[in-house]
Amino acid sequence: MNGVVAAGQAPPTGPDRPASRRWLPWLLAATVAWAVLLTVLTWTSVRDDPPTVREQRSLAEAGPVVDRAVGELVAAAGDTAVLTPPEIERGCRVTPFADGAVLIRGVDVFVPVGVERALLERVAERLPGHWRAGVRVTSDDGPRLRADAGEFVTVEGTVVGDGRVRLTADTGCRPVGDGYAAPATGATGAETEALAAALRALGGPAGAAPEVVVAPCPAGGAARTARADVVPAPPSPAATLAPVARVPLLNTPQAYAYRRGGVTVIAGLAGDRVALSATTGCPA
C-alpha cells in the first residue's frame, strides 16, 4: 500500500507498457492519413471554391479586375479623365513567410476649382450599384470616395490638389503569381495624333513615341491615354494651343483642356512646365 512491491510481483504499470507500444503504429498511420486528408481538402477548396480572402488570388489573377474597374472609373468621370500608368509596389508581406506586391491603377480628373466633391459624388452615383460606392467628408482628408469592385479590389477617390481628383483601384497585398500583364495597347490611334499636334504647338520634341495606357470600357472598346514628357510652359498655354484646339473644355490655372474630334487633350500646368495627355474615353 505504501508503494513497495513484494518480491516476485510485477509493477502495476508493467503489463500496460507493451500494449501502449502496439498502438504507436496505428497512431502514426492515423496522423499521416489526417494530414493527407487535410491536404486534399485544401487543394480541392482552392481549386473549386471562390476566394474567401485576398491572399487566395494572385496579382496576375486580380489584374483584369483592376483593369475593368479603371474602365468603369473613366466612364463615370467624364471627359477630363486621364489614365495614369499602372504601379506595382513590391515588398509587402502576404503572410509572415511570403512576400507579395500591390497593383494600383489610377485615373486623374481635372475640374474647375471648388467642384471636386461634386465630381466624386457624381462618380459614386454612376458606378455599378453592387460596388456600394459612397462619399464621406472628414475634417482631415476632406471628401473621399470608397467602393468595392469585387474580388477584394478597393476603389478610392481623393482630392489631390486644387481642381484635381485622383481615382484609384487597388489590389492590396497579393501573391505575385505570374505577375501583372497590362492590357495590350494595340496600334496607335487618334489620341497619338492629337498629342503630336499639341506637342508641335508647344514646341515640344518631335518624333518621340508617347507612353500609351489602356483600360477596357464597360460597354466594350477601350479607353486610351497617350502621355508625353513635360515641356516648358508658354506664357499662355490656352493661346498657344488655340490653333489646334477645337472645343475648349477647361481653362484654369491648373489645366487647360479641349476636345479634338473624339479625343480630349489636357495640358496639366505645374509651375513652369506642361504635362500633356490625350485621351479617348469611355461612354458614360
Image (cartoon, rainbow, N blue to C red):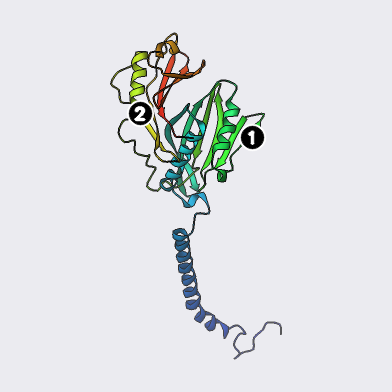
Say few, some or many: other residues with alpha carbon within 10 Å of mark 1 (under 14 / 14 to 19 / 20 or more).
Answer: few
Give the residue at x 41% y 28%.
Answer: 279
Name, please, the residue furthest toward the bottom.
Answer: 8
How many marks the image carries: the answer is: 2
| Tag 2: amino acid | Glu
Residue 75 on image: x %, y %: 48, 35
**Relative to 15, residue 42 above or below:** above
Give the residue at x 46% y 58%.
Answer: 46
As rendered, which of 50 and 28 lies closer to the eye? 50
Q: CA distance from mark 2 to mark 1?
A: 34 Å
Residue 181 on image: x %, y %: 37, 42
**Relative to 91, residue 278 above or below:** above
Say few, some or many: other residues with alpha carbon within 10 Å of mark 2 (under 14 / 14 to 19 / 20 or more).
Answer: some
In the figure, is residue 133 to the left or right of 90? Answer: right
In the figure, is residue 47 to the left or right of 111? Answer: left
As rendered, which of 95 and 235 lies closer to the eye? 235
Residue 262 on image: x %, y %: 40, 27
Name, please, the residue furthest toward the right.
Answer: 1
| Tag 1: amino acid | Arg
As rendered, which of 196 and 9 lies closer to the eye? 196
Mark 2 or mark 1, which has the lower sequence index? 1
| SS under mark 2 | strand
**Relative to 91, residue 39 above or below:** below
Name, please, the residue furthest toward the left.
Answer: 207
Give the residue at x 54% y 80%.
Answer: 20
Question: Residue under circle 2?
Answer: 211
Give the residue at x 65% y 31%.
Answer: 137
Question: Residue under circle 1?
Answer: 136
Residue 275 on image: x %, y %: 42, 20
